[in-house]
Image (tube, helix red, strand yellow):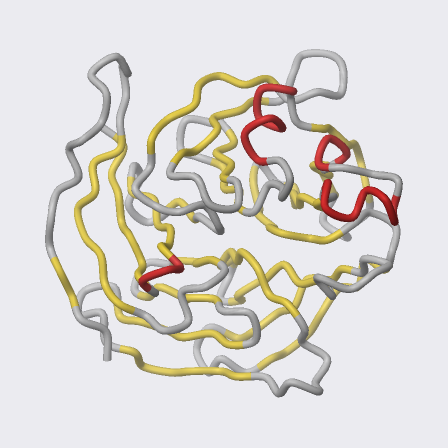
Amino acid sequence: MGVLTLLVFTSVSCSYSRRFQEVRRFVAPEAQQGVAVDAEYVYVVGTRRIGKYDKQTAECTARWEGTEDGPIIHLDSGVVVDGKLYCAHSNYPKLPMTSSVEIWDTGTLEHVGRHDFGVQYGSCTWFDRHDGYWWAVFAQYDRWKHATGKGTESTTLVKFDGRRKELKRWVFPKEVVERIIPMSNSGGSWGPDGYLYCTGHDRSEVYVTKIPDRGSVLELVETMPLPVLGQGIAWDRSRPGFIYGIRRKSSQVVVSRLK
């Protein structure tokens, strides 16, 4: 069972016109990679395990765990769509990079399917649904540039149609790449304002981006403090303005509100 704590995060620079205020956090041993959320539950994602937590009580109601020799190697961010939990998955830190989206039934936490991306993009770190399309980021890392020929600057956002057919790609602007290097973009979630909010591997900040009118480089709108330590994030689409993230060093889920 998680331990629930109520507190407020206020140590944010007054120079920001908007800010995130931390309103809640609770302990979840799975809080190592990311989170997903629906109207009643928080799905906390570890490398090979998932915990389902009641949003009000922080009680764990179900768990799923893979085996070390099983097909699930490295889970990342997730999103809940129509009663299914979709989690980004890769063979990180192995090379060549392979990726898939793994799917669970949110009611039972039974693994019910997958979509395989193969080796064509990189390491899938997050997956989301927005504006009738699927969106995913495939990371590249400076730490393996000597072997792959691609560094963090080659991390790519891909837009897919309903059948996961690629429609378009974008890369991140230099200002973001410089903040996430030598790792990559770890989390992403489309906000209620139509902006794409992205996180790195370990900084307590979120990069607010948008799709450019032309070209293939995302536009950075602003960088905002967020009381997480990188990793996966998820907007609560049942409560606009609330965003979930994690602090992996203390195995905590953090809930914040955009003010």
Residue 113 location (% of width, % of height)? 68, 74
Query: Which quarter of the picture shows residue 139?
Result: top right
How many marks can you see? 0
Residue at (72% x, 28% y) in the render: 171
On screen, 225 above or below 60? above
Residue 228 location (% of width, % of height)? 35, 46
Query: Which quarter of the picture shows residue 66?
Result: bottom right
Image quadrant in which the N terminus is located: bottom left
Relative to 258, is 174 on the left or the right?
Answer: right
233 vs 202, nearest the viewer: 202
Q: Is residue 237 visible?
A: no
On screen, 166 above or below 218? below
Residue 55 location (% of width, % of height)? 25, 64
Q: Is residue 118 visible?
A: yes
Residue at (70% x, 62% y) in the render: 92
236 vs 220, nearest the viewer: 220
On screen, 228 above or below 13? below
Residue 252 location (% of width, % of height)? 30, 61
Residue at (53% x, 58% y) in the render: 78
Image quadrant in which the C terminus is located: top left
Residue at (60% x, 26% y) in the render: 178
Relative to 107, is 137 on the left or the right?
Answer: right
